[in-house]
Amino acid sequence: MLDDIIRMVLHVSMIFISVTMCICLVRAIKGPTFADRIIAINMMCVKTILLIVIVGSILEEAFLVDVALVYALLSFVAIVVLTRIMLRSHFEKPLERDDENKKEAPGEE
């Protein structure tokens, strides 16, 4: 009886997490800024990790926890790389504009 209730709760939580992943996907596609897209992708990665752990507990397979840990590490590295790319492109653009302004007005300092 208790196992049936736990399985039902796990299935309902999987459905809820899947729905929220769809909402995050919409935000990742539609997001007005690059930061919104990064946050939405990060949330989707966390929800995927949750789904892997829940499936592992339903199937009673312990190796899926290891899979979730590896996925967590890979998603962390991916988010860090994407954030560095965003920051690098964000801070290089003003420098290029400053160089162009200096070329246009060489006498002013």
Image: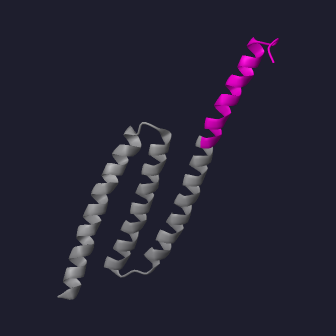
Residue 67 on image: x %, y %:
48, 71
Residue 101 on image: x %, y %:
72, 18
Which residue sits furthest bottom?
Answer: 1
Q: Please state the extent of the stretch shown in magenta in the rendering.
A: 87-109
- Predominant secondary structure in magenta? helix
Which residue sits furthest left?
Answer: 1
Please report the residue visible at 42 percent of the width from the left and 36 percent of the height from the top. 32
Q: Is residue 84 depicted above or below 54 in this figure? A: above
Quadrant where the N terminus sits is bottom left
User: In which quarter of the view is residue 64 placed?
Assistant: bottom left
* Residue 51 left/right relative to 85: left
Quadrant where the C terminus sits is top right
Q: Is residue 91 depicted above or below 2 in this figure? A: above
**32 within the magenta span:** no
Q: How many marks?
A: 0
Please report the residue visible at 38 percent of the width from the left and 76 percent of the height from the top. 56
**108 within the magenta span:** yes
The answer to which of 69 and 20 lies nearer the viewer is 20
Residue 60 on image: x %, y %:
36, 82
* Residue 62 left/right relative to 54: right
